[in-house]
Image (cartoon, rainbow, N blue to C red):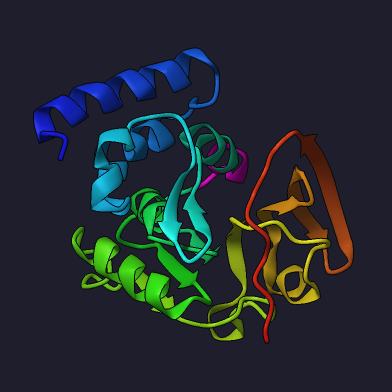
Amino acid sequence: MLCVPCFTKCMSRLVNDLIKGGYLRSDSVIDAFSKVHRIEFVPEDLAGQAEANIALPIGYGQTISQPLTVAFMLEMLDLRPGNNILDIGSGSGWTTALLAHIAGANGKVTALEKIKELCELGEKNVGKLNFVKKGIVQFHCMSAEEGYEKNAPYDRILVSAAALEIPSALKRQLAIGGKMVIPIASSIWHVEKKGEEDFHIEKFPGFAFVPFVHKS
């Protein structure tokens, strides 16, 4: 396993590379990337690759996303302390922990993961950072097609799996003025809700994600 000092040094290089490439820009996201180490969220046998700018398998046909992609999506979300956030496809918990770090003590992150084993792993990983104990993060092992109405409306919604279209429930549960980042096919869509039926959408092609897991 990669030693912590070596990993921290490598992670700093990765963060610096993402800053130089223009993918990490805001202080809050840079701070989250610097303090929420990816090595805590990858399988032990892949720990030596945790600082690499590549997607890695986490089991059950799923991956932990490439750091460049995660940075791109988090910057587009324009996160703020105190945000109420829905994290869909939380996987092993890295994006959830990054979101929780930025949302802070007054924020809330609802993490949804359909694959029970990954959901439990993600909760365990995020629990190491005390976000669950502090009540900032709650996990639900369930399909995300219908979102999670109980904690809506959401200031921000992050989706980490590719859908064919934006689920209507997510449109409904996004607060007016809220922002959603979601992969649609091979593009990342930035969605801002201007009114109940008024959505401004920007599309950024050239990305690859595991598919959205639908209810069986």
Assign the N terminus to one quadrant of the image. Answer: top left
In this rendering, position of residue 134 left or right of residue 38: left
Residue drawn where x is 45% and y is 51% of the image: 57
Of residues 147 and 104, the one drawn nearer to the viewer in this rendering: 147
Q: In front: 90, or 60? A: 60
In which quarter of the view is residue 171 placed?
bottom right
Above or below, 181 against 71 in this view is below
Q: Residue at x 68, y 60 (%)?
A: 211
Task: Indicate whether 10 appears above or below 38.
Answer: above
Dividing the picture into quadrants, the one containing residue 116 is bottom left
- Front residue of this view, candidates 18 and 10: 10
Please state the horizontal and vertical placement of residue 123, each as a whole percent of the image.
31, 70
Image-based side of 111 in relation to 178, left or right: left
Q: Does the image show residue 36?
A: no
Which percent across, then down, holds residue 151?
53, 79
Magenta-drawn stretch, dominant element (helix, strand or loop)? helix
Q: Position of residue 14 (x, y in %)?
A: 36, 23
Front residue of 118/1: it is 1
The answer to whether residue 65 is magenta is no
In this picture, which residue range is highlighted in magenta?
74-79
Q: State the image coordinates of residue 141 (x, y, percent, origin top left).
A: 46, 81
